[in-house]
């Protein structure tokens, strides 16, 4: 790595709280640059340089807005997380679609929500999707999925024929109807985290955001009458009169549940703890931090006391991959 990029990486790590000595950078099945190339579809030097010129990134199509988070005070009866002892905490949100295509249609089913909850002394970031099923258990599978997906129908069929995890993902997406609003989608953190219980024990769990407005799906007829760019305008108009809201839960694992594999689905009967409520109302949309939120990264392992990452390799590769992608856009 040349000195300029090393300096930029160091600055990015200071901003995000991520260390240069992360074992993910050393022990990953695939290197971080290889993973970013797979996501961006830049397998060689020429395509990589072309990608840098257009500031290529995943979740290219998206927008920033703002609001607040209201913690549930009763959470402290079960978990010890001082961060949630605050009254109301400011939120910066980015809603987006998947992929590096800035012209992807809003009629596709995928919805993504990233949040920065900035407290008085600590911060908490979320990277979530409306698809609770992930497509890879490890970094090799992740790399193969992203690489084959860029090959079109032939690559997708290869994944269906050869990777059961990818097939399960495609099967789920196939039956998932597009929602009429970001506000009508649930969002899932497919990775697990470790939470400190009041008795000092460590409790694994996952994030789930449930929309207060309820879930909704567009019919074929409704979809036909919409443009390919309706989601941003719909949400920003909605929050002028009423906020978009989600109840945030932690779904708790039980003995025998697989913790470090994002492909593992836990039974819906698992206990859920109400953490609080996200309220998106655009109240800080004029702030530079909000207006420029898509120029940085959302770091899912920037965590307050009482929460630590699990050993999930997908989770622990996210931050260095996001930093690598950021450096390529500078």
Image (spheres, helix red, strand yellow):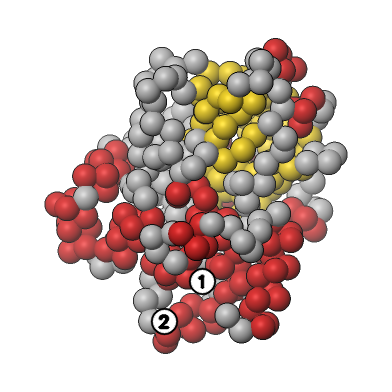
Picture quarter with the N terminus: bottom right
Residue at the image point whose x is 56% and y is 68% from the top: 324
User: Residue reaching furthest left?
Assistant: 161
- Give the image quarter of residue 177: top left
Q: Is residue 39 visible?
A: no
Which residue lies at the image location 58% right of the left edge and 58% below the top edge? 22
User: Residue lying furthest bottom in this view?
Assistant: 46
Q: Which residue is mark 2?
A: 47
- Is 219 situated above or below 64? above
Secondary structure, mark 2, is helix
71 in relation to 74, above or below: below
Is residue 319 visible from the viewing direction of this image? Answer: yes
The spot of residue 284 in percent (x, y) is 79, 46
Neighbour tally class for label 2: few under 14, some 14-19, many 20 plus, Cα within 10 Å: some
Which of disc 1 and disc 2 is earlier in sequence? Answer: 2
Determine the residue positioned at 21% across, 50% down.
163
- Separation of disc 2 and disc 1 at Cα? 10 Å
Q: Is residue 29 left or right of residue 128?
A: left
Instruction: Name the residue carrying label 1.
Output: 56
Q: Residue at x 50, y 36 (%)?
A: 192
* Disc sitting over residue 104 in the figure: none
Q: Give whichever of 31, 124 is nearer the camera.
A: 31
Which quarter of the rendered picture does the C terminus lie within? bottom right
């Amino acid at each position: 790595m040349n000195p300029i990029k090393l300096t930029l990486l160091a600055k990015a790590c200071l901003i995000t709280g991520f260390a240069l000595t992360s074992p993910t950078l050393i022990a990953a099945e695939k290197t971080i640059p290889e993973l970013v190339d797979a996501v961006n579809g830049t397998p060689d030097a020429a395509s990589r340089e072309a990608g840098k010129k257009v500031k290529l990134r995943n979740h290219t199509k998206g927008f920033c807005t703002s609001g607040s988070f209201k913690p549930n005070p009763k959470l402290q009866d079960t978990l010890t997380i001082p961060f949630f002892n605050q009254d109301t905490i400011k939120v910066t949100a980015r809603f987006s679609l998947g992929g590096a295509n800035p012209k992807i249609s809003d009629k596709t089913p995928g919805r993504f929500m990233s949040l920065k909850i900035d407290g008085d002394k600590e911060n908490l970031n979320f990277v979530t999707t409306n698809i609770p099923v992930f497509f890879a258990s490890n970094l090799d599978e992740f790399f193969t999925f992203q690489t084959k997906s860029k090959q079109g129908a032939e690559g997708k069929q290869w994944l269906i024929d050869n990777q059961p995890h990818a097939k399960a993902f495609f099967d789920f997406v196939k039956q998932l109807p597009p929602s009429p609003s970001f506000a009508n989608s649930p969002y899932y953190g497919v990775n697990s985290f470790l939470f400190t219980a009041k008795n000092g024990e460590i409790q694994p769990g996952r994030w789930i955001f449930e929309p207060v407005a309820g879930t909704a799906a567009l019919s074929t007829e409704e979809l036909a009458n919409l443009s390919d760019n309706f989601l941003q305008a719909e949400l920003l108009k909605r929050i002028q009169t009423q906020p978009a809201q989600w109840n945030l839960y932690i779904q708790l694992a039980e003995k025998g549940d697989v913790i470090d594999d994002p492909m593992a689905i836990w039974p819906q009967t698992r206990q859920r703890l109400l953490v609080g409520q996200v309220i998106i109302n655009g109240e800080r949309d004029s702030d530079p931090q909000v207006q420029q939120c898509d120029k940085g990264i959302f770091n899912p392992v920037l965590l307050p006391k009482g929460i630590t990452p699990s050993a999930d390799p997908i989770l622990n590769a996210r931050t260095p991959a996001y930093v690598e992608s950021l450096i390529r856009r500078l």
